[in-house]
Amino acid sequence: MQITHLKTAEVFSIRAKSWIHCAAGQLWLSHDGHDVILERGQKWQIDDTDLAVIQALQNSHFMLLANEKLSPAEQNFALA
């Protein structure tokens, strides 16, 4: 699993089915008509290959996790 580091205001984009897990900091995520703020420990699922844009609201670290890597218990802690 790879950790991506973003400095404040840096932007990252992705087209892949995965979970975005904010490991540190605060991220703004825009995907499929949703605008979401993720804070440390929160996750968001991208369930299609539409473009998702992530911007760091402060220095942040996040991981991209394949859908199958999250247990049902972990998925309960994700934002809905």
Image (cartoon, rainbow, N blue to C red):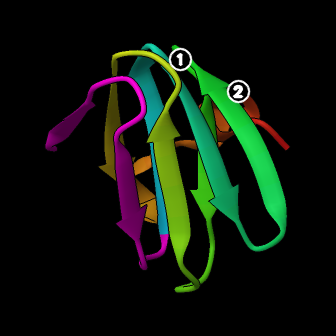
Which mark, residue 77? 2
Label 1 packing within 10 angstroms: few (<14), some (14-19), many (20+): some
Left or right, 74 with respect to 11, comes to right
Q: At which x and y percent is residue 48?
A: 60, 82
Residue at 67% x, 57% y is: 30
**39 shown above or below 16:** above
Res. 54 in view: yes
Real-space CA distance between mark 1 and mark 2, rounded to the nearest whole angstrom: 9 Å
Please state the horizontal and vertical placement of residue 29, each as a whole percent of the image: 62, 48
Is 57 in front, or is 76? 57
Q: Please tell me whether mark 1 sits on a helix, a strand or a loop.
A: loop
Residue behind mark 1: 41
Q: Is residue 47 left or right of residue 24?
A: right
> Residue at image x 75%, y 41%?
36
Q: Position of residue 16 (x, y in %)?
A: 42, 77
User: Can you see residue 78?
Assistant: no
Q: Left or right: where does residue 34 sit relative to residue 60?
A: right
At mark 2, the secondary structure is loop
Which is nearer the N-term, disc 1 or disc 2?
1
> What's under tag 2, amino acid-wise?
Phe
* Furthest residue in direction front, as rendered: 9
Tag 2: Cα neighbours inside 10 Å, few (<14), some, or many (≥20)? few
Q: Is residue 64 above or below residue 16?
A: above
| First to last magenta residue range | 1-17
